[in-house]
Each structure stands twice: as structure tokens, then as C-alpha cells.
Image: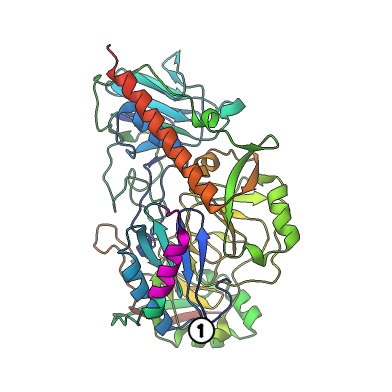
Amino acid sequence: MSAQTSSTSPSTSLLGTTALLFEAPGDMSLPSQQRIWALAREAETWPEVREAVPGMNNLMLTFTRAPRHLDALRTRLCDAWDSATALPREGRVVELPVVYGGEGGPHMADVMAHTGLGIDAVVELHSAPLYPVYALGSHPGYCYLGGMDPRIATPRRKVPVLSIPGGAVSIGGAQTGVSASAGPSGWNTIGSTSMVFFDPAQDPPAMLQPGDMIRFRVEGIVR
Amino acid sequence: MIEILSSAALATVQDLGRTGSLRWGVGTSGAMDNLALAAGNLLLGNELGAAAVEVPVFPFKVRFAEDCAFALTGVDCAARLDDQPLLPWWVHQARAGQVLTLGLPQGGAQRGSRAVLCVAGGIDVPEVLGSRSTQLRGAFGGHEGRALRRGDVLRAAATGSTFRTGFGLVPPAIALPLERDGVAAVRVLPAAEYMAFEPASREAFWAGEWKITPQSDRYGYRLEGEPLRPIAPMELRSHGIVPGVIQVPHSGQPIIQMRDAQPSGGYPKFGTVIEADMWRLGQAPIGSRMRFIETTWDEALDALDEVRAWLDKVARVVELHRGAPR
């Protein structure tokens, strides 16, 4: 059982002896993510858990010391999921101006080819929603967003790109996001924006938290 | 004070890694050969996780501006202090003005790719989010959040000649060897999508040799071998990952996540190199071949216990030397 399919019961799997991955059942949704936030809050108080890290409708538990008997932890985790109620968060709304296509969006053509849509349609569908921040990950300050229109979903690239710049707006599978700094990525970059997402001297160091919302405002389209 | 005299390509300040900030998207970083770093620190009587300089490109030169005890661990790189050859995995005393040169990595049983230079008290750089490791992607931690350059000056947290020197260790490559059919090996626990690959691919993964390609670094090792084919294409939801995770992008050529890897990903996960073997992987040279050994949860935990026991033994040996009359 893996994250690609939806089912009725959660699944767990190992990341070596370093961590355990919990995946919520069903279609990806905000209520399900709110339960993940609640589960994270509980699991991070357990002694064998170093950190509880939300992903997209999933949760990674890293170990302080890997337990000999995993079944007890797995059972506890699934029980906690069953009794978890959605933890809503009223976050801020942050608007990001985006230039779509052109040099800052080198893979726009791939997204158009895959979806069969023109650039205007891709931009309209991408900039329409108010995207909730589901989780942070990938690199310091990077936000995983929910709520992308499935019509512009595009598979991750066959070979990851060695470096995309900070501020790159991209699509990977059914997800979208903005890179917070330059680095490698397997996603399709369709535009660019500018924003400081991370400052290690601040507490918390990330500017956006799960529950905050992002709106992409169309600053321009390069055809 | 230690001055970097080489262009020092890709040498960085590392400790045992940054934990507790994964939720902000901050990966762990940390020494590629964590065992070399821990043992080097033990040799000096430092804290186990004190910061050190990790050197992946040779030759590499530093000048000691004042007396300083140091330990060299990791790959045996024919090091010299001025003209005097140095033993690897050994504690030495540098006098003010002396130049330490790390030469080319030597072959043999201790074949490796990274040297670790530990100094008395550890490298004194500020702790950022609980660690002194360099976070290259985030450009913070370590020395100014970047790889070292010629002319950089680092401070050892403790200097002078109060440290006991002139003793050493049998390196873990000899004390804890692991090979399969004469090829360096690491143990792997299957991960979530393992069974979603073709049976022939699963068989080929364990049976075949894998080449570490030149597109390999602290972020990840890109491997080359028999392509791994999924039974059906997979697009996963992004989820947390850790160093050691073996991802398989659509090309079928696996990528092992290393210490600078991002803390989340979405490519299918074939397996994970166990924590106890990450130091072996950290020393695997580019262009070398390796094998994977399937393991179980219990064996993987036994392997971690074995590593801890080796470090405990090192601590006891060091205690004997340090307690001995001068």
C-alpha cells in the first residue's frame, strides 16, 4: 500500500531504522490534512519520537532511538489517527506576484503538452485558487500547497533538474509550490516570483506555517 | 586558528547533523562518515558530535597558527605535517606555523573518499538551529553557510598542548568490514513501494553491481545499473524522507539520498540504506561499484548496536591512553 492509491485504512512503512512513514487513507483533502496536524501534535510527545513531520496527507516520525517492537508503535499511531479530530488553523493570506512562462518558466511547454491546454488556460487555472499550506519540506522554508486544479497536474520530470532558482513556481504531479532557494528539483517550473521564505535567525525560522494561504497573482505572461 | 591554504573545493564544516528542524524543511546535513567524525572527537576527548572539517577533494592544506592537537580520520590520505608522514586514525600535535597536507586517498582495505579533520574542542562556529553543520541549500550553519575557501580562518574551541597525542585506532573499515562477492556492500530495508516494482527488477537490485556515477555528491548518489521498472507508473504524494532512502525516478536509475538530501520527496522508494551503514556509503568513491544486501528490522537494529559498541570500545581505549602516565 503506498501513497499513490486511496484506500479505506491508513498504512505505515519503514524509512530504514531512521523513521516510520504514516499515510492517511482516502483522497487528498484539507480535512484529512487537519487530522494529520492533530496526529503530529500528539505523536511528537511520545518518547521514541524525535520529530513528527507532516507531509501531504501523511506523517513521518523520526526516532530518538528505533524501538525493537514496531508493532506497538504502529498500533498506537493508527489508534491515534482513528481518534484524531481535524485541527483547523486560521492562517494568514500571502499574495505572490508571478511571471508565468519565458525564462522563469522553462517547463511551461511541457505542462501545456501534457495537459493539452494553452498558456492562458494553464495560468488561469493555476492562479485561481487560494492555496492552503499543508506542510513544509524539500528545503528550508518550502511550502507544500493543497488545492491545485487537477486539470493542470503534470508528472514529475523523468530526470531531476540539477538546479532551479529560488522563487520558481512549479508543478509536480497533482501538487504545486514555490522554491525558497536555488537547488535540484524534479518538478516542472512554470513561472517565477520573489519572496524571502526562511531566516534561520527568526523563531520560527520559516515565514509560512501549515494553515497559512498563498494566492498567486498574475504579474505577467511570457509567451 | 587554522588557515585554509587550498582552494578547498567542497570541504565543509560538519557535526553529527541538525535534528529537530525537519518541519521547517531543513534537512539534517552532517558528516557523510559519521563514524569517522565521532571517533576523531573521541580520540581528542571532545564531545562526540563536535564540529570538524570534512574534506572530499585532495590535496588539501591548512596551516596551524597556534599549537593545536588534532585527529585525522576517514580515508587514509597520506597526510604530512610539514615533511613528517602521519598515521591515519591517530591523534597528533601541531605546533604554531606547521602545515598539514592531506594527499591522495590510498587504496586497499581502507579505500574511501572523505577525510575528517577533528581539532581540540571542535571547530568553533556558531550553532544554528541546534547544529554547526553547513546547510548548503539554506546557506547557513558551518562557516558562513558555505563550503570553505582559500584564506578562510577557523578557530579550534580548545588550543594549547594539554591534549594527549600519539595514539590511534584500528579504523572501522577494518574493524567492521562488509562485502558481498568481494564488492563493498551496504544493507537495505525495503521501503513502501518495493513490491510495486517488477519482480525481475527486485531480483536485479540485490544481484547486480551498482556504479556510483560522477553525478554524486553530499545531496545524493546517482547510481548506474540494471534499470528498476515499476509494474505501473507511480505519482506519490510528497512525504518525509531521510538520508539513505533509495528513490527511483522515471529513468529507473536509483538515487540514494545522502546527508544534504532534502527532507521530503515524492519519487517511489525502493528501500533505505540502514543508518548503521551510512558511514560506509559516505566513504564510497565516485566510480566505484557497490552491492546491496537485503536486511530485516532486527538485523538493522543489531547493526546499530554493533556501531554503538564499537564507539564504546573506542571511548574505553582512548580513556586508557589519556589516563596513562606521560
Q: What stretch is highlighted in magenta?
A: A66-80
Q: Position of residue A137 (x, y in %)?
A: 42, 65
Residue at the extreme right of the image, as rendered: B200
Quarter holding residue A62? bottom left
Residue in front for this viewpoint, A115 or B287: B287
User: In this picture, is B188 found above or below B81?
Assistant: below
Would you say A114 lies left or right of B1 here? Answer: right
Report which quarter residue B209 is drawn in.
top right
Q: Which residue is drawn at 30% across and 17% down?
A: B95
Name the amino acid type tagged 1.
Val
Chain of residue at mark 1: A
Quick check: A181 above or below B97? below
A121, B32: nearer the viewer: B32
Horizontal and vertical percent position of residue B261: 48, 54
Which residue is denoted by mark 1 in the rendering?
Answer: A123
Residue A159 x, y percent position in the rendering: 62, 61
Q: In which quarter of the image is residue B47?
A: top left
